[in-house]
Image (spheres, helix red, strand yellow):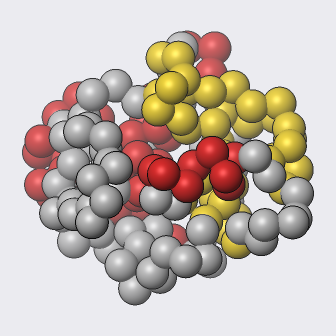
Amino acid sequence: MALDVLILRDPRESLQKCSLTPLRGMAGIEFVTYEGGRRLDAGRRILLHPDGSDFTAADRGKPLLLIDCAWRKLPKLLATVDGELEHRRLPQLETAYPRRSKQDTDPDQGLASVEALYAALVLLGEVHPELLASYHWRDAFLRQNPGLGCTKGQ
């Protein structure tokens, strides 16, 4: 199935450290940079959100919105988004990314953005191993989360 992913990203986040940077230019993935006074019309999408409900079979095939920012900035960026958004959360998964937060605001089970995107799409019925092709910790992430349905070499 073709990708339909919209990513709203905070321009203050480092592109060099961002796990989504290798996905720029990939068909079906659109990056939009947050600008405080600008509204983003996301249309009808599943919003990946830590306070959402669980994914359901009825979510399959729906487009996805991912907000790429520090956890503490999520409300600010989300406030600029218009559309019919269905909030969904990921099940408990284990990150392979060596995370650090200077302000200690990350939730215990937080994931790298590319890990969250990959997992959300799997839950929407789409396995896209190409999303993890350039991710340094791909093999460890898939090994730590065998329920995601993709193994090394796929």
**Residue 70 coordinates in the image, percent (x, y):** 46, 59
**Residue 103 coordinates in the image, percent (x, y):** 31, 60
Q: Can you say whether 98 is above or below 127 in the image?
A: below
As drawn, the residue found furthest toward the front would be 103
Q: Can you say whether 12 is above or below 9 in the image?
A: below
**Residue 128 coordinates in the image, percent (x, y):** 44, 51
Quadrant location of the N terminus in the rendered image:
top right
Quadrant location of the C terminus in the rendered image:
bottom left
- Nearer to us in this view, 81 or 44: 81
Left or right, residue 99 beside residue 74:
left
**Residue 11 coordinates in the image, percent (x, y):** 61, 77
Q: At 69% across and 47% down in the image, what residue appears? A: 78
Asked if residue 149 shows in the view, the reply is: no
Q: At 52% across and 60% down in the image, what residue appears? A: 69
Asked if residue 116 shows in the view, the reply is: yes
Q: How many marks?
A: 0
Q: At 45% across and 50% down in the image, what residue appears? A: 71
* Residue 82 falls in image quadrant: top right
